[in-house]
Amino acid sequence: MHHPNPPAGIRGPFRLISPLASGSANGNPGDLAERAQEHADTRKRVLVVEDEFLLAAVLASDLQQAGYEALGPFVTLTEAMEAAGSESFDGAILDINLKGELVYPLADELTRQGIPFLFLSGYEARNIPESFRGHARLAKPADPAAILRAVRSMLRTAS
Amino acid sequence: MARPPSNVTQFERGRPNPDDVAQWLAAIVESSDDAIISKDLDGTILSWNTGAQRIFGYQADEAIGKPVTMLIPSDRLDEEPSILSRIRAGERIDHYETVRRHKDGTLLDISLTVSPVRNIQGEIVGASKIARNVTQRKKMEKHRELLMAELSHRVKNTLAIVLSIERLSFSKQQDTEASGVFRARIHSLAQAHGRLAEAQWTGVALERLVEDELAPYRQSETSNTRISGPPVILSAHCALNMVLAIHELATNAAKHGALSSPRGQVVVTWERKDDGVLLEWREQGGPAVSPPQRRGFGRLLLEQALHQELGSNVSMNFRPEGLICTILIPPQELEVRFD
């Protein structure tokens, strides 16, 4: 496997093109990349907060292939909070447990800013604070198609 | 306290001396670790044992004559009138879990039993309260719940990573069908873990597992799936094995069997037997069936893994009109529920 950046260098904005999105691993090399380029101005940006490198890599590449720009991945709460303060984006996918820290302060911040987000987590409803229990949440492991559907509907509610 | 229980009076040989009995009872109350408090029908504290002193921090002379509400946090003050009215009606309140306040302000998790106390005429004149400090137990429960949430979170995260590795290991041209089959198996395992976590690892209802596996194929108009049986809870170990087996049956039915044709039907039933629960998977109305040539993963799982892991007897009958698979789940893999 080949990554253009070592893991430590991967910080937002997301520049990693994973093997999935690269031509060699893709049915239609270049196709999606070109399309993504064409729509560069209108592409919606999705903040990815996920501390597992491999999950984040697949998630980001799925988002990119679907025509979104993946911003991140941010692996700690501090990094993600900074990004939420300085970057502009249309929605966010939040893992809940970030190396032992819980993502809720960021969720509160996004709520305050009116930016839609969805949780992607292995936690059960019972382990989630009541204020967020009813919030959009996908259980890990989530089907990639289900993630994209959820992202679409999240961004629709925003616009 | 009026009317000592008869087994106490029998303790003394011959005619019981009422003073001895009273002293005996007082000694029992004094030596209890639980707080034993009595109060009148207005909620004024009448007696206060050493256990109460230890749990709530007040000496007897600081408590006796005071309203019992001094132990109740302000957001729970409405509990007392309802307790008193139930006592007046002669009701007993058993192991009511609530929160009370220590003299120093600390909140305590308490299990409370309150019983009416009657005078010699049988009239209710007050209440005895037995309070057990369950703060430590509650703390342990919370800790246990936290550990289980972490465990479950980790298991699901790991399965998600397995799926990512699979995605990153194979290109799209490489055998996408096999890859899809693999992913679906991992997903069904993950779903079963989710069900287990929901039930705090106490077991999963068989019906829930079967429903989860058949849900992707169900068509309400044609009722192509039917599931029925008495409530059965599978052990965690059993559930994780069974879910894989049922997943194989379901995907096989969708590919080759009854769920591959619009008129086909899968009927899953189970019943309790002396030697366990007998589950039957019956396919009907689908394309003509012939025994498969190849023994794939599904049959390995059904015919060997279930036997080894659960001690299940599995039989597979590839009738031309549809597969019948029976699985006997032995009693040790069932959770007995008393609730």
Image (cartoon, grey):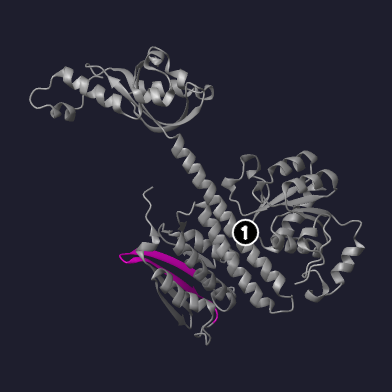
Residue B30 located left or right of residue B287? left
Percent coordinates x, y for residue A119 in the rendering? 69, 51
Q: In this view of the protein, which residue sits in the foreground, B200 or B285?
A: B200
Instruction: Write down the quadrant of residue B230 in the picture.
Output: bottom left
Residue in the picture at 44% in, 77% down? B304
Magenta region, residue range: B267-287
Percent coordinates x, y for residue A63 in the rendering? 78, 61
Report the number of discs.
Answer: 1
Instruction: Write down the quadrant of residue A62 in the picture.
Output: bottom right
Residue B25 magenta-drawn? no
Secondary structure under tag 1 reads helix
Q: In this view of the protein, which residue sits in the foreground, A9 or B238?
A: A9
Percent coordinates x, y for residue B162 in the rendering? 63, 66
Image quadrant for the N terminus of chain B? top left
Q: Is residue B172 above or below residue B118?
A: below
Tell me the residue that label 1 is attached to: B157
Q: Is residue B86 visible?
A: no
- Marked residue chain, label 1: B
Residue B286 located left or right of residue A57? left
Residue B283 magenta-drawn? yes
Looking at the rendered structure, the kind of residue marked 1 is: Asn
Give the residue furthest to the left: B14
